[in-house]
Amino acid sequence: MTVKEYNRSVEEYSDSVYRFIRTNLKDEERANDIVQDSYEKLWRNVTEIGYPVVKSWLFTTAYRTMIDIIRKENRMTPLEDHDNYDLISESQYSDLNEILHMALERLPENQKSLVLLRDYEGYSYKEIGEITGLTEAQVKINIYRGRVALKNFIVKIETVI
């Protein structure tokens, strides 16, 4: 890859990678750091990576870096119980976007990432498999399970009312 192609990849893909990571982590600073680290790794491997594969390489690198950060945090702090969303019936929500974000937060990280890559970023099952290192069948199964969980959460009458 040439320097010109590297700069073009920054212009074309940095925003998409940032939005994907920020959506998962809910932290703008860490998302910026991950994107910057991904481009730094790309620069170190610029002679080995061709421009046609740079987009999937960046998403794969950013995704794996994000997973490493999540795993590190999970080792340091105990996981919080997300079952407290059953108390939502006491509150009134009319913002569907807020409800969707709450439903996404309930999903396991792998399902959440896969659903976001497919439905938000528009990647094919094959591309998602390349990014995450999963088979196409595993990607389809996890996306299906994530969508079912989202549907079940959103359809609850207590949530919508």
Image (cartoon, rainbow, N blue to C red):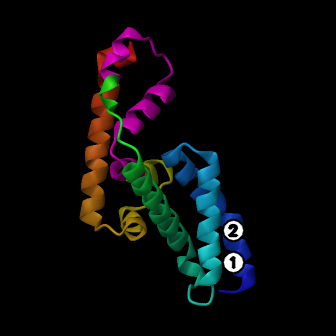
Pointer 1: residues within 10 angstroms few (<14), some, or many (20+)? some
Residue 61 on image: x %, y % = 50, 69
Residue 120 on image: x %, y % = 49, 48
Q: Residue at x 50, y 29 (%)?
A: 97
Please name the predominant secondary structure of the magenta segment in the image. Answer: helix
Q: Residue at x 55, y 69 (%)?
A: 58
Pointer 2: residues within 10 angstroms few (<14), some, or many (20+)? some
Q: Tell me the element at label 1.
A: helix
Q: Is residue 13 visible?
A: no
Looking at the rendering, the stretch of residues picked out in magenta corresponds to 85-113
| Residue that mark 1 sits on | 6
Q: Residue furthest front?
A: 76
Q: Residue at x 38, y 12 (%)?
A: 161
Residue 100 on image: x %, y % = 44, 32
Task: Please report contact status of discs 2 and 1: CB closer than 8 Å, yes or no.
Answer: yes
Q: CA distance from mark 2 to mark 1?
A: 6 Å
Give me the disc on residue 112. none
Vertical arrangement, residue 123 with respect to residue 89, above or below: below
Q: Is residue 81 left or right of residue 57?
A: left
Whether residue 95 appears in magenta in the rendering, the answer is yes
Q: Amino acid at mark 2?
A: Val
